[in-house]
Amino acid sequence: MCGIMAYLGGRDTVEVLLEGLRRLEYRGYDSAGVAVSVDGKIELIKSKGKISVLAGLLQNNKPEGRAGIAHTRWATHGPPSTANAHPHPDCEGHIAVVHNGIIENYLELREQLEKEGHTFRSETDTETLAHLFEKYYEGDLEAAVRRGLKQVKGSYAVVAMSDKEPGLLVAARQYSPLIVGLGEKPGENFAASDPSAIIPFTRKAYLVDNGEMVLLTADKVQVKTLAGKAVKKPVFHIEWDAEMAEKGGYKHFMIKEIFEQPHALRETIGDRIVGRRMGLNLEGLGLSDGYLRRLKKIAVIACGTASYAGMAGQYAIEKLCGVPVIVDVASELQHRESVFDKSTLGIAISQSGETADTLQAMRTAHRQGAKLLAITNVIGSSVAREADGLLYIHAGPEIGVASTKAYTSQILAMLLFAVHLGQVREAMTPRVARRLLRGIKALPELAEETLEEAGHIKSLAAKYKDIKRYLYLGRGAHYCSAMEGALKLKEIAYLDAEGYAAGEMKHGPLALVTEECAVLSAVVAGPHYEKSIGNLQEIRARAGRVIAVANKSDKEIAKYADDVIRIPETEEVLSPVLAGIPMQLYAYYVADIWDREIDQPRNLAKSVTVE
Ligand code: M6R
């Protein structure tokens, strides 16, 4: 949510800042701006709209300087406008600030500063920081930022510059992600809210922790606590390479990432399944066998798509291990006082690892004595750092706002954990474990086979293009497929789509079914097959159109559906990985027909770092 990029060095500063912003645009795209230090002055250029608008403005009026800060915004306080775009200056334009997060006490601070004579130009909480730093500035930006931040309640990743100290940037972090990029060659350094912004320039980084401050010049980076104590940081190596964050010939990141799923799933498996005997090695899990044997309940903490991956895990863990699993969205879970205790394991699932709701619920869980396992994509992210145990999904950068490859990889990681838990608790025989692991190992190839349906799914999207109301239904392992399918269509095609447990139809939603409604349902072999067929019959009896996602070997399904999308056979508990793919493709092709902004849907952002 919002992206920050900062640079000091000898390259074309504006070009570096714009390149970083373009890679961060998925975090927010309401407005953008840069501030560059030029001959002892700060030049500020910003605009409403996407980075391309800003780039256009800069083409004819490019500030030449050796230090700059930049921002792409997802509006929280104040609507999208040029005035509300970052960077924000102080009264006289001597200081400029970019910020992600929320200053919770900004109204109180603003009132006080206005009384003291400061003039505000925007409606943002961020502008308060610029005026606070101005108030405390006595020739030392570091001291001003430190004093200013002492007054602040809330979350921030902030970078400030002053025209009086042109070669210096001061950054700080509290609960919003911040990374420092260390120049591969001497004489340049970077700061950003996300590694993807700096990977074209460097892979060496410091992961800034909460309560830390960073002083950056082109030649030196010093990390301190907010209290001023020096901190020695290990250099972190970013593994993702620049090409992974490019579109690579695809029309959108989303479709590229859908097609990357076989690779992403292979990476999630990595060397975790070993040898012909199918040994399972979850190195780094960080949860002892003794603890896993003792735990009594699991609660999945996640938002949106990640929570639906959690539902797939819930089904697998309950079925294979006999351990009860609660799944609730993190924004609710953080207030459910009696869910967590010492015998409950919280599993936090998050692609970005920076989702504020998820982090808050993790903190609730920790306070109440629970242990936490993180399943995340971003190495060193806040979710990873605040958990007791870790399973990285290694899916590679996911740039499209709609989550695709992270979803299927998250399910796969949950499945690996389910098998591990089942083995440790002796809830499954070694034979069953081997069978499941063999099935998991085959998933990347089966995902490739599933992707072969893309052409057929594209033609279905065209066939049903005038349908405006969708229901997505699923039972058992595929309740999650229904929820995720509907979310994808809403998110990128802007169509009404509801996900339901199929058994709920008769309790209300059936009233929505007419010939103007299409129903997508995953109906795969397993204990819920017959009842799912029953639901399809109910729909067709009311003139609804049915698109079924069913197994290749299913000879019956065509009788109950208008159209069928085929997926290969696998164990029922593993099948959500495959059923997720047609749901993504259908949403993508429908959205493309309507010419939606697929990678950056309206009102949304990739990483939601505010509550
Ligand atoms: O980064 P996270 O996995 O924590 O993000 C959680 C949700 O915001 C995210 O999955 C969201 O629902 C997706 N945009 C859906 O495609």
Image (cartoon, rainbow, N blue to C red):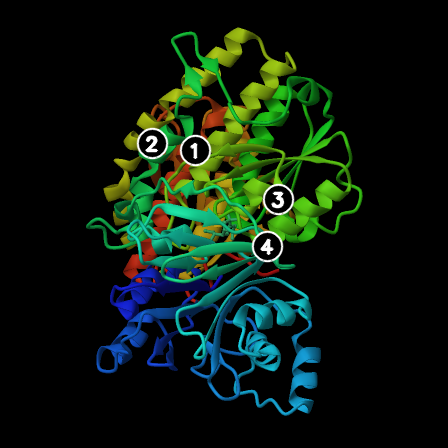
Does residue 106 lie above or below 359 as drawn? below
List x then y, in percent, for residue 50: 35, 71
Q: CA gap, disc 3 to disc 2? A: 30 Å
Crowd rating for badge 3 (residues with CA inside 10 Å; few <14, some 14–19, many 20+): some
The mark nearer the N terminus, 1 or 2, is 2
Q: CA distance from mark 3 to mark 4?
A: 31 Å
Where does label 1 land, which residue?
577
From the image, state whether disc 3 or disc 4 is nearer to you. Answer: 4
The answer for how far apart the CA atoms under marks 4 and 2 are is 31 Å
Reading the image, the residue beneath label 2 is: 447
Q: Amino acid at mark 2?
A: Ala
In the picture, the quarter occupied by the C terminus is bottom right
- Secondary element at image label 1: helix
Q: Callout 2: 10 Å neighbours few (<14), some, many (20+)?
A: many
- Mark 1 in CB contact with mark 3 (< 8 angstroms): no
Looking at the image, can residue 561 be seen? no
Q: Is disc 2 placed on a helix, strand or loop?
A: helix
Q: Tell which tag, 4 or 1, sits nearer the viewer.
A: 4
Q: For mark 4, give the secondary structure.
A: helix
Image disc number at residue 356 = 4
Residue assigned mark 3:
504
Q: Are marks 1 and 2 in contact (CB under 8 Å)?
A: yes
Identify residue type, mark 4.
Ala
Q: CA distance from mark 1 to mark 3?
A: 23 Å
Q: Are marks 4 and 1 in contact (CB under 8 Å)?
A: no
Instruction: Of the two numbered discs 3 and 2 on the same chain, state the one appearing first in sequence.
Output: 2
* Residue at image point 32% right, 33% down: 263
Q: Nearer the viewer, mark 4 or mark 2?
A: 4
